[in-house]
Amino acid sequence: MIHYLTGEAGSRTVAFIGILLAFAATCLTMYKCMDLLPKDQGREFAVDGKKSAGKPRGAGFLFVLVFIAAALLFARPSRETFIYLILVGAAMLTGFLDDCAKTPWGEYKKGILDLIIAVTTAVTFLNFNSSEVTFLLAGKAVTFPPVLFGILAVVLVWVSINVTNCSDGVDGLSGTLTIITLMTVFLVDTLLADGGKADGFSYLILLFCVCILGYLWYNATPSRLLMGDAGSRAMGLFISIAVLKTGSPFLYIPVALVLILDGGLGLIKVSLLRFLKIRILTKVRTPLHDQARKVWSWSNTQTVFRFAIIQIMLCAAVIYIAMP
């Protein structure tokens, strides 16, 4: 922990320094260590997937480690937060081991690991928080039975991990959308504090975002490295935790809608075909970013900017609703 400064001013100064150092450390770590990461083999069925072949993959391993270190040094995490940091690290490691594997892990293996992380996250949240849910649009709060809340929380976490993972396929896309989503959650959390100071988890959101920015410095088109499952799975988990901490878990739908549609439609399409032999969206490529590039002829830059514009518009509406 950092204890060189005391008092409110000292805490703010330490927090300010922590944000700057987290970004600088991420950039430096990426620059020095990217060549040590496993190399991408390209994806046969993805649009322009072969162009990724040979690039360092698994950069999420680096920026998540920097984030966890910065959180421990500057955020003074509570017991609850400390458990979340362990879970984010676990999600990153499962993804990184898959990134390093010569043969990609099977969907069932990854799904089960995600489920274990989701259940642990839900149990941890309920142990430290109530099962009350606030509906921002209605301005009302409802207390859910803990078991029902836990089940819904598991679904939220599992979905968030997987749709974020599936949206990772265009330079800068999933990282940019994640930052937009998380910064909206940060603003909503601050507004819900009625002018007071948001809880300590809000500072972790800022640290996580600046670490992603450090990664995006090297991932912007044309990218020099890729986050891999190590980054996308950790980002998805962190988004779900951040949304749960607002006390308004259904907030996830509007603030992450582009991630949900981009990555989630493919999951639904494949699941229905595999388990129920039902074909849907037969003329739509999934993830949607492949539809945008292949069918609509959007460039990578256009895809990132337009998807980001749509999500920013949705988030602006959410922020207005959250205003007291």
Image: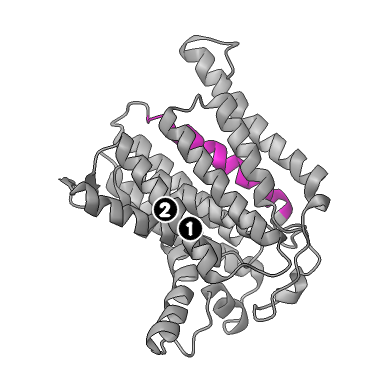
Residue 258 lies, in percent from the top left, at 45, 64
Query: Which residue is at 35% across, 41% downward?
Result: 125
What whole-number distance in Å separates the C-alpha atoms at marks 2 and 1?
6 Å
Quadrant of the drawing holding the N terminus: top right
145 with respect to 238 (left or right): left
The picture places residue 294, in percent across and down from the top left corner, at: 62, 82
Mark 2 and mark 1 residues within 8 Å of each other at the beta carbon: yes
Q: Examine the rendered structure and indicate whether residue 285 appears above or below residue 58.
A: below
Q: Which element carries disc 1, helix, strand or loop?
A: helix
Residue 181 seen anywhere in this rendered image of the structure:
no
Q: Which residues are magenta?
A: 198-218
- Locate the C terminus by quadrant: top left
Three-letter amino acid code at disc 1?
Asp
Q: State left or right for residue 32 relative to residue 149.
A: right
- In reply to whether residue 201 is colored magenta, the answer given is yes
Name the residue beneath numbered marker 2. 118
Position in image of residue 264 (x %, y %): 45, 70
User: Which of the pair 310/54 is nearer the observer?
Assistant: 54
Q: Return the mark for residue 49.
A: none
Residue 135 is situated, as x and y percent measured from the top left of the image, at 22, 50
* Image point (29%, 56%), residue name: 151
The residue at the point 18 percent across, 49 percent down is 145
Q: Is residue 112 left or right of residue 220?
A: left
Q: What amino acid does circle 2 point to?
A: Ala
| Residue that badge 1 annotates | 114
User: Is the residue 264 above or below the residue 242 in the image?
Assistant: below
